[in-house]
Amino acid sequence: MPGIDLSGKVALVTGASRGIGSVVATRLAQAGAKVGVNFHASSELATAVVDKINKAGGVAFLVGGDVSQEDKAEAVIKQLVEHFGNIDILVNNAGINIDQLLIRMKTEDFDSVMNINLRAAFLCTRFAMTHMIRQRSGRVINMSSVVGLSGNPGQANYAAAKAGLVGLTKAVAREVASRNVTVNALAPGYIVTSMVEEIPEDKQDQILARIPMGRFGTPEDVAEAVVFLSSDGASYITGQVLTIDGGMIA
């Protein structure tokens, strides 16, 4: 948001090599935060995000690792803290979808989606929380989805993981509120990313008809919400789920 100053803050955005994650990382840097750009497989894309931020006058640091793996998640947090000195903002954005009707869904596809969308958030939050509790301040923002609130045919694994993030958010928010650490979730609707662009045009028209605002959201819409929840202005907001969907599930 214009006017929000995150100077002196250190942020980590998981899955920040593309889509919403890359825009969130860039926007946090524009607000003054030093940003760790996490990636798993897309090193070239992540490097491009870091270069873009640094060339624009921001401060970004590349920190690779599959955060759904315990040792890698711990290493990512450790590397960030060693580089910048602390961690103030954690955006658990890493996620995938492998869609299929439940009756045809492979167990490994269910597990993969749960691990990357939910387990990774649990691990990163646990390792980051040690530092946040010690410094008695911190912001954790979990990237859920409207699918986790309403369900969606063919996305039982994705919906379960995103709903799990809501429960994780609320439970951890209660645990750490007395330490001045807030934990919130965002639930984006249909946001213009490669995932939405792959939807056939006739299906896109059907979806748009269900959105009162008559348009898809943008990654920038989500990024502005992240910046706000990271700011001092959101210091009394915790355990909440902010839906960014143009009114679709209102």
Image (cartoon, rainbow, N blue to C red):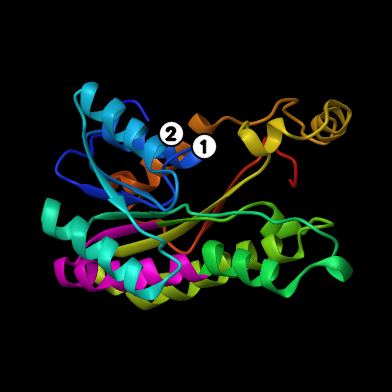
**Residue at (29, 35) in percent of width and height:** 50
Mark 1 residue type: Gly
- Verify whether residue 132 appears in magenta: yes
Q: Identify the residue under disc 1.
A: 19
Mark 1 Cα shell of 10 Å, populated few (<14), some (14-19), many (≥20): some
Question: Residue 25's quadrant in the figure?
Answer: top left
Q: Is residue 238 left or right of residue 132?
A: right
- Verify whether residue 245 appears in magenta: no
The residue lying toward the viewer, choosing from 193 and 132, is 193
In the depicted structure, whether residue 238 falls above or below residue 61: below
**Residue at (41, 44) in percent of width and height:** 16
In the depicted structure, whether residue 211 falls above or below residue 109: above
Q: Identify the residue under disc 2.
A: 23
The location of residue 214, given as percent across then percent down, is 75, 25
Q: Which SS class for mark 2?
A: helix
Can residue 3 be seen here? no
Can residue 137 be seen here? yes
Mark 2 residue type: Val
What mark, if any, has residue 60 been given in the picture?
none
Q: Label the magenta part by its dominant secondary structure.
A: helix
The location of residue 88, given as percent across then percent down, is 24, 55
The location of residue 17, given as percent across then percent down, is 42, 41
The location of residue 230, given as percent across then percent down, is 33, 47
Q: Is residue 47 left or right of residue 168?
A: left
In the depicted structure, whether residue 247 falls above or below residue 136: above
Q: CA distance from mark 1 to mark 2?
A: 7 Å
Magenta span covers which residues?
119-140
Q: Is residue 185 left or right of residue 53?
A: right
Question: Residue 136's quadrant in the figure?
Answer: bottom left
- Give yes or no for contact between labels 1 and 2 (Cβ–Cβ under 8 Å): yes
Question: Residue 100's quadrant in the figure?
Answer: bottom right
